[in-house]
Amino acid sequence: MSQQSTPPGEVTTVACIGAGVIGGGWVAHFLARGYRVVAWDPAEDAAARLGRLVDAAWPALRELGLATGASRANLAVATTLEQAVAEAEFVQESAPEDLDLKRDLLARIDAAAPEGVVISSSTSGYEMSDMQRDCSDPSRLVVGHPFNPPYLIPLVEVVGGERTDQWATRWTSEFFELTGKSVITMDREVPGFVANRLQEAIWREALHMLDNGEATVEQIDTAITEGPGLRWPLFGPCMTFHLAGGEGGMAHMLDHFGPSLKSPWTRLQAPELTPELRDAMVDGCERSAGERDIAELVDERDRAIIAVLRAVKGVRGEQS
């Protein structure tokens, strides 16, 4: 069982294993935050492809603001995996979503990376408990699941496996936060994590509606971009429904609309709205609201929606 010797705030060198769309996005993100990045990918054209990915991402990163010392010149492409991780103080793996491949690759990284260096996987669905099976030091392996493109979308979900030490999960979450990420540190493993499961629920219902002739692709997309999607940049689904309850908040919303959970609005079966589930949702919304009352939350929501509408109009070239 190892212990990370480099504090999260003192990391200077990151290894990125896998240089596809996700791996390349991670490379661009770390370069923009001022790190030295050593990448490796088994593809023959990996260096050229990675260079194009970083070049394409750089204008957006420059617009967001580069960290002091950030430069594309800080990227090196190694010829072997062992060379890539030799001096790494953090490793991000982004190989294709194949369990056997992940197991083998993570075991190779574990064997080659310096002792105590955290190894994070970009897997979009596998549990770390299943991937760390063949590693000699599974205590340092965690999931660091990003959203595409990793250099723009802040979210990363962090969770360890059954054999992961708590220090590794805490260290990884702190490190990602220092790189500018918005981190969800999960309390337990769940296939698909949090965001993918929510996204997948919408996606599956969209496929059902299209398959049954209930809505077109355009109608489905417009239903999100011109509807609930405008509310979600500031408040997610839980806080959105908290405001839907008016002055009574989530408690009123659940007590009034709870029976509609049994309505056949989606193909996803709703859980039983037990008193325990009701209270857990109400308490969570109250914690999220903090000292803000409903009127203040509504004001924040409305200003955010206006900002999003204006931003989208600007992208489309429309007049405000």
Image: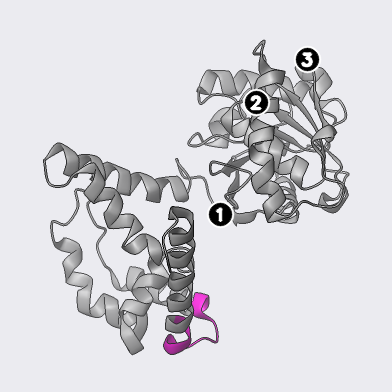
Q: What element carries label 2?
A: loop
Given the image, on which type of amino acid does mark 3 rest?
Thr
Q: What stretch is highlighted in magenta?
A: 287-297
Question: Does residue 254 appear left or right of residue 188 in this picture?
Answer: left
| Residue 110 x %, y % | 74, 26
What secondary structure is the magenta-colored segment mainly? helix
The residue at 22%/50% (across/down) is 219
| Residue 291 x %, y % | 55, 87
Q: In this view, does 237 lie above or below 136?
A: below
Q: Nearer the viewer, mark 3 or mark 2?
A: 2
Q: How far apart are marks 2 and 1 (CA)?
A: 29 Å
**Mark 3 or mark 2: which comes first in sequence?**
2
The residue at 16%/62% (across/down) is 262
Given the image, on which type of amino acid does mark 2 rest?
Ala
Given the image, on which type of amino acid does mark 1 rest?
Asp
The residue at 50%/34% (across/down) is 126
* 291 in the magenta segment: yes
Q: Is residue 319 above or below residue 12?
A: below
Q: How far apart are marks 3 and 2 (CA)?
A: 13 Å
**Mark 3 or mark 1: which comes first in sequence?**
3
**Label disc, if present, on residue 187 of the rendered structure:** 1
Which residue bears the numbered disc 3? 80
Which residue bears the numbered disc 2? 19
